[in-house]
Image (cartoon, helix red, strand yellow):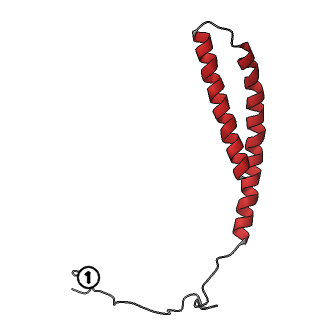
Amino acid sequence: WRKGTFRLDQLRKEMNATGKQIGKLKKAKQDASELIKKIPGLKTEIRSLESKVVEWKEERDKAIASVGNWLHDSVPEGETDKTVRTWGGAKELEGEGDE
């Protein structure tokens, strides 16, 4: 997933740089036909890699979801609502309660 995302970012970067070069060449009234021919191939590669990255991300998320939390040995098993320790006391707020 990471390698795919990195490659996708590199392709997008190349696409943007190519577009800027085309703009500069056209502004200078020079031939940019070779760069223009490169664009459709980049777009196709980006589209196919985007779909693969989405699949890889879903696989990654599925694998991550199957792994539970690692709990310390002191954490009690079973009863999740059991109070193990308290600290401080409950404070009464002024203005609340029976008047």
User: At 64% from the left edge and 79% from the top edge, which residue is drawn?
Assistant: 70
The image shows residue 20 at horizontal and vertical percentages of 60, 22
User: At 67% from the left edge and 31% from the top edge, which residue is drawn?
Assistant: 14
User: At 76% from the left edge and 19% from the top edge, which residue is drawn?
Assistant: 37
Q: Secondary structure at mark 1?
A: loop
Residue 49, image quadrant: top right
How many marks the image carries: the answer is 1
The image shows residue 75 at horizontal and vertical percentages of 58, 89
Residue 57, image quadrant: bottom right
Residue 29, image quadrant: top right
Seen from the viewer's position, the closer of residues 51 and 21 is 21
Residue found at the very far top of the displayed protein: 29
52 versus 31 height, above or below = below
Neighbour class for label 1 at 10 Å: few (<14), some, many (≥20)? few
The image shows residue 55 at horizontal and vertical percentages of 76, 51
Query: On the rendered image, what quadrant is the C terminus found in?
Result: bottom left
Is residue 15 rendered to the left or right of residue 44?
left
30 versus 5 height, above or below = above
Residue indicated by mark 1: 93
Is residue 3 rendered to the left or right of residue 29?
right
Seen from the viewer's position, the closer of residues 54 and 30 is 30
The image shows residue 3 at horizontal and vertical percentages of 72, 49
Give, as a three-letter code, the residue at label 1: Leu
Is residue 26 rendered to the left or right of residue 82?
right
